[in-house]
Amino acid sequence: MPPPQSETPSVISDLLGDWGEIARSHLKSLDYETDALADPEHATIALLNVQRHRVPRRPRRVHRSRELTDPEGELCDLIAAIERGDDLVPFQSKLHGPLFNDHLLNDWGIQHFHLVPSADDTNDKLLFAWVTEDDLYAIQKLGHRVGGHRTFDDQQLVEILHQNWPELLAPYRAPGVVPGSLSGPNTPAGRRTLRAVGFVLGTQTSDGSVYNPPGGGSAMGGISTDSRRKGLSMEVSIARNQCMQFLTDNQRCLSTKGHAFVEMARSSGYGSKLGSPIRLRLAYHKGNFYVRHEESGVTALLAPSPIVVHTAGDAWLTGR
């Protein structure tokens, strides 16, 4: 028997737990393993990492650098897929899970693609590119290693960007820095070492121009001994912190002001369907978080989400 209308039932919620389930469910829909993501924070990092790495589907104009040559025509399939707006995930790395921190993307904002879809990661041919909403700037076709070191740490990628499309890097020019004054790390091995522990590095081109990290840089590895946070993208780190704080604050608010949801449901004629206690679950839809009472279907806007989840169409994301 439902409680008398004069009584206010207790409200139960677990926003962090629900959000972890939403994040894991969405990652599963994208074919990622989630066994290591029981912690909502780790699930959040994984979701943000995946969204940062995946290129949203839409047709893009392709611009080639002066240094890029392809006499064998190896780029044809990839370029055609980019211009058509195909899903580019099949052209991306297969070795790394959702918690992988892409230091090339985090530091220089540069993506890399295999030349054929679903290629094994040992395939040595890659296209390095700068991707925007409507355009892709093809920097160079290179192997995984060049000159005895990893291509991902080679400053020639930024040099080519600077020489061909300086307007892309202009927003990242270091203000107040004397051109040519930057020292170290001046080797790919040195940059790789510092990236791995989360140092934010500047990059100096051959004409002395100095840039802050176009990819936003990485959070210091010293934040935590947890390997899942070492070298984490600064962008992902900030968004993760905002999301966790948002859900914690709103959980506290619901614990003390859950009666407002009850009054809203009663005024809409759903009071008899609420039961006691009232279990509210978190839902996400089009940039907003909601709380939902599943038995009655009553849904209330919680607040705009501090992060955006890329979903297909008009989908609602719910946990459990």
Image (cartoon, rainbow, N blue to C red):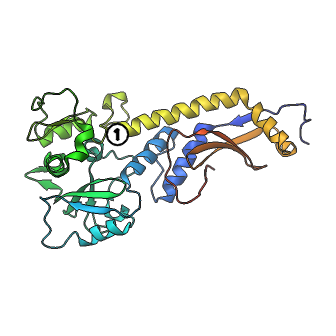
**Which type of secondary structure does the marked residue at label 1 adopt?**
loop
Q: Is residue 207 left or right of residue 124?
A: left
Q: Position of residue 304 (x, y in %)?
A: 58, 40
Q: Is residue 186 left or right of residue 104?
A: left
Q: Nearer the viewer, residue 315 or 39?
A: 315
Q: Position of residue 156 (x, y in %)?
A: 13, 48
Residue 220, quarter of picture: top left
Number of numbered labels in the structure image: 1
Q: Is residue 209 left or right of residue 76?
A: left
Q: Which residue is mark 1?
A: 233
Residue 187, quarter of picture: top left
Q: Position of residue 18 (x, y in %)?
A: 60, 43
Q: Nearer the viewer, residue 263 or 292?
A: 263
Q: Is residue 229 visible?
A: no
Q: Position of residue 160 (x, y in %)?
A: 15, 51
* Residue at 46% over, 33% down: 241
Q: Residue furthest front?
A: 167
Amino acid residing under circle 1:
Ser
Q: Check disc 1: other Cα within 10 Å, few if <14, some if 14-19, many if 20+.
A: many
Q: Is residue 176 left or right of residue 306?
A: left
* Residue at 36% over, 28% down: 223
Q: Nearer the viewer, residue 94 or 178?
A: 178
Q: Is residue 91 above or below residue 106?
A: below
Q: Is residue 281 above or below residue 77?
A: above
Q: Nearer the viewer, residue 181 or 120?
A: 181
* Residue at 42% over, 50% down: 51
Q: Quadrant of the N terminus?
A: top right
Q: Is residue 292 visible?
A: yes
